[in-house]
Image (tube, rainbow, N blue to C red):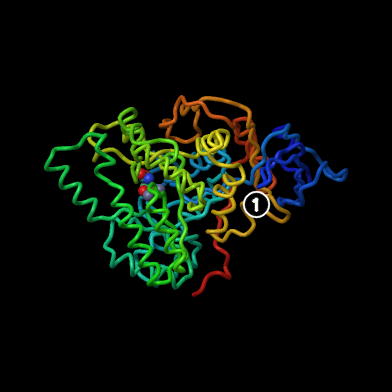
Amino acid sequence: MGRDFYSKSFFAVDDAKIPTPEGVKSCCIVVRDGKIDGLVSSPPASVEAVYDAKGALALPGLIDMHAHLRDWEYGYKEDFASGTASALAGGFTTVVDMPNTKPPVDTAQLLRRRIIDASQRIYVDVGFYAFPTKGLEEVRRLAAAGALGFKVFTYEMSWQDVEEVMANVSRTSSLLLIHAEDAEVLERRRAAAKKLGREDVASHPWLRPKKAETVAVEKALELAHKTGCRLHICHVTTTDSAHLVQKWRQIGVQASCEVTPHHLMLDASAIRRLGGIAITNPPLRSLREVRSLWRCVGEGLVDALVTDHAPHALSEKLVDKICDIRPGIPGFETALPLMLTAAFRRRISLSKLVDMMCRKPAEILGLRDRGLLARGSRADLVLVDASERFRVNSSRFLSKAKYSPFDGIEVVGRVKAVFVRGTLAFEDGEVLVKKGFGEVVEPRRQELRR
Ligand code: NCD
Ligand code: ZN
Ligand code: ZN
């Protein structure tokens, strides 16, 4: 179908299967002017064209609320074009970019520069987080300039500074995302490792123990309670973290949390096998912890599934000393097949998968017309052949990071086609839209308190 289909404004996607809480249902999705017009049983006679989904699974365009698109001075790792092409190939139509770029996004001036640079190069929609570390006035300016939320790495600052940042972010009624690992716990392990001369890759989980995470999660939740800040905990890897979020939520804290496919699908034994390729922060945990983390997902304690797509050059991963390895795993092109494979094995239902990869991220970020297959929503759609089995092959990634800890494993669920705002943007491995087709996602204006 490809290019012929490129820009029809009123069409139907027929013979699609959509996941619902009651199971998968066959349906026809009608699209008009970039929005979903309705879900019907067969294509209305008045449409300009019909796209035959051939029984593919249709999901709302995936929303990744935690990704690193890099660009700027880290453009050798990934840039706006390669990163968003990779996202598109993975079924993501909206991604939100983390501010740990070079230079870091911590002023409104830099955020505006990033928005301008991105808008010329992105294939899918992109929102931006910023660092709230330059005082209240700058936080206000960043919110006004379009930051979708703010991010801090707790191990880079004192808890007193985290508290100040939370107070400032809460005054813009924005969201604070945190990478929760406690500086003191990490420092104690680092000092001990130095004494013992431990610098091998396998010591990574020991260097960054579960305690570093749970101490930071608890402290952050306490401070969110005190300051009234809306808090989102990035990549939880322990059941304690998930339970703490639930506990403080019951006390009235507005908190949410996320998990990544790699923390669900891999355990620490992968580090011995794969070395630097399996190094990410927080670290991969024991098989026992991974199993319990799945239970937390099952119990609904984890809100969102994110990729934490964190590409680095291969040469930055293949080094001997743990302190020299750049942490992070590229995730856009494996997340959906990995999760569909888990669904296939009945570890998660399809409707929960859609909840965690679409509806919940949209809700947490306040993106009202995304993440749902419903009348009036943006026509962001991903069609997946749920019966196709294949092996992960990172050499074919559109990301610049052509490696993966999942290389060679068998998965189900190939992304066949992706529609962005009703335009067929990707089909059978090929990107069909131009750079700059993606739009910058800004927060809803009425939500900003100045
Ligand atoms: C991320 C990166 O490379 O930017 N690395 C990682 O190990 N996850 C940073 C982060 O999300 O902590
Ligand atoms: Zn992180
Ligand atoms: Zn990250």
Residue 193: quarter of image: top left
Q: Where is residue 152 in the image (x, y as percent from the top left)?
A: 36, 58
Q: Mark 1 points at which residue?
A: 372
Q: Residue, x 56% and y 61% (percent of image)?
A: 366
Residue appearing at x 24%, y 32% in the figure: 320
Closest to the observer: 445 or 363?
363
* The quadrant where residue 159 appears: bottom left
Q: Which of 82 and 327 is in front in this view?
A: 327
Please provide percent x and percent y for residue 235: 41, 49
Q: Residue flagged by tag 1: what amino acid is it? A: Leu
Left/right placement of residue 253 relative to residue 322 reads right
In the rendered view, would you say 257 is above or below 430? Answer: below
Indicate left or right for 110 with 157 as reference: right
Q: Residue 189, position in %: x, y?
A: 20, 47
Quadrant of the image for the N terminus?
top right
The image shows residue 412, relative to residue 13, as above or below, that is above
Tell me which corner region of the image, top left, top right, bottom left or bottom right, holds residue 403. top left
Q: Nearer the viewer, residue 1 or 362?
A: 362
- Outermost right residue: 45
**Residue 1 sits above or below residue 72 on the image:** above
**Residue 351 in view, yes or no:** yes
Q: Where is residue 178 shown, x and y percent of the image?
A: 39, 57
